[in-house]
Image (cartoon, helix red, strand yellow):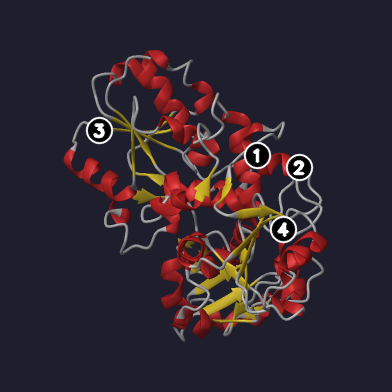
Amino acid sequence: MKLKFFTLILFSLSCFAASAQQLQIYDNTTYKAIYFKQACDLIANTPNLVLLDVRSPGEYADTSRFVGSRIGRLKGAINISIDSVLKHMKDLKAYKGRPILVYCSHSQRSRKVSKFLADSGFTNIYSLNGGMTAVNRTTDADFPCKSSIYTSNLEYKLVSPGDAAAFIRDKNSLVLDVRPVSQFKGTDSLESNNIGRFKNAMNLPLDQLDQQMDKLAKYKDRPILVVHLSLTEEVNAAAKLTRAGFKNVSILYDGIDSFILNFPSSAKVRKELVTGEPGYKIVGVRETIDLVNGNPDLVVADIRPNDQFENKAAQKFMNLGRIKHAANLTSQSQLEDYLKGKPKTTPILIYGSFSAGTRGMKGMPTSNPSDLSKKLAAEGYTHVYLLYNGIYDVVWAAANVDGLQDAKTILTDHAGLY
C-alpha cells in the first residue's frame, strides 16, 4: 500500500501540532523560513553560522530503525533532537548570539524548534523549508551547493526525481524495479499501486531478490537504480545489493511515483520513459495548480469526509481547507449525479486527504480516489486527473517547495490554519 507520505506526515503532525495544526503559520514572524538556495547563500556567507539538526540521533547518523528516514544530513551540523532541546538549553545558549539554521526531515520539527528558540530570546533563527526531504528531491543543478554541504553514511546514493531521467537513459545502467509483479504489470488489487513502470526496467521483486541475485551478476560494477513505490522497500533492496558486493547502487528518492509526479502528464520525458500508466492522469502539485487556475470548466471533486471538507474534523491536522471550486462528492453515485449532462470531455480533478492509497484507514473516505478515477475513465471520461498525494501535498508544497509557492492560490477556506 502506498502510505509512506501519509505515515510521515501523520506522525509529524500528531506529534508536533501546536494551536495551528500547520506550523508554517509562524514562518517569517520571530524566525525566518528559507529555501535551500537561500540556505546555500547563508552558509557560504556566514562563517559563524550554526547548523542545528533536530531529528533523532538515528536519523542524523543514518541508522534510524525507520530505514526510510535515512536520508543524509548537512555537513557540520550539530544534532540536538526536538525532544531533548529543553535538556540542552544550556548548550544552546552558547550559540545565542550567532545565526542558527534549523532543519529536520520535512520542516515541521524545525519550525517548532525555531519558534521555541525565538520565543526564548534567540534573535537570528532560520528554518530550512522542506528539510532533508527537499534536499533529496531537488536536482543537483537546482541545488548549487548540494555537493558541498550534503553528506551521509549510506552505502548507496539517493537520486532525485529530476536527476533520474539521465540515469534511466544511460544504456550502461540497470533500472531495477523491486515491486511485486502485480504492481509492475499494473494488475494490483489496490488501484493506487497501478501507476506505471519504466520502459527499460527489470522486475525482480524484493522478496525474491536474495534467491535470484545471480541474474544481476553482470551488473556488479555497473550503475543500478533501485525503484519501488516505497522508499523503505528501496532501501531494503539496496542493502541486499550492497551486502552482495554491488558497488554502484542508487535509489530513486521517494519512489517511482515521485518521478511521475515530478513531470506534467503530457511531458515528453514522462511519455518517453514511462509505460503502463492508467487510463486517467496521475498529477502532482504543479499540474494541479495549472489545471485549477487555467481551466474554468474543471470539475473539482473532493472525496474527503464532510467533516474534513468543512474543517470540522476532530483530528485538527485533517482540517486543511479545500481546493477552489471543489464540490464534496464522497461516493461514485454522488460524483456521477454531479456530472449528469456534462460531456465526457469534461476535465475532472479528484483528490482526497493524503496518499491515493489510504482506503480503509481511520478518518479516510470509504471511496478511494484511484478507484473513482478508474471508474470514470472506464465510463469514457477522457480527462480525469487524480491528485495522487492529496490536498496535503498542495499545502505542504506551498510552504516548502521553492517554485510552488503559488500552490496557495488554489486553496480556500484555510484562514488561520496555515
Query: Mark 2–mark 1 contact, CB under 8 Å?
Result: yes
Dot 3 crowding, Cα within 10 Å, few <14, some 14–19, many 20+: some
Q: Disc 2 marks which residue?
A: 363
Q: Is residue 72 visible?
A: no
Q: Identify whether 14 is placed above or below 247.
A: above
**Badge 4 is on which residue?**
357
Question: Which mark identifies residue 88?
Answer: none
Q: What is the three-letter code of the residue carrying label 2?
A: Gly
User: Is residue 268 visible in the rendered structure shown here?
Assistant: yes
Compared with 85, 258 (above or below) is below
Query: Which of pointers 3 and 4 lies earlier in the amino acid sequence?
Result: 3
Image quadrant of residue 121? top left
The quarter in which the N terminus is drawn is bottom right
Q: Nearer the viewer, residue 411 or 208?
A: 411
Q: CA distance from mark 4 to mark 1?
A: 16 Å
- Mark 3 vs 2, N-terminal side: 3
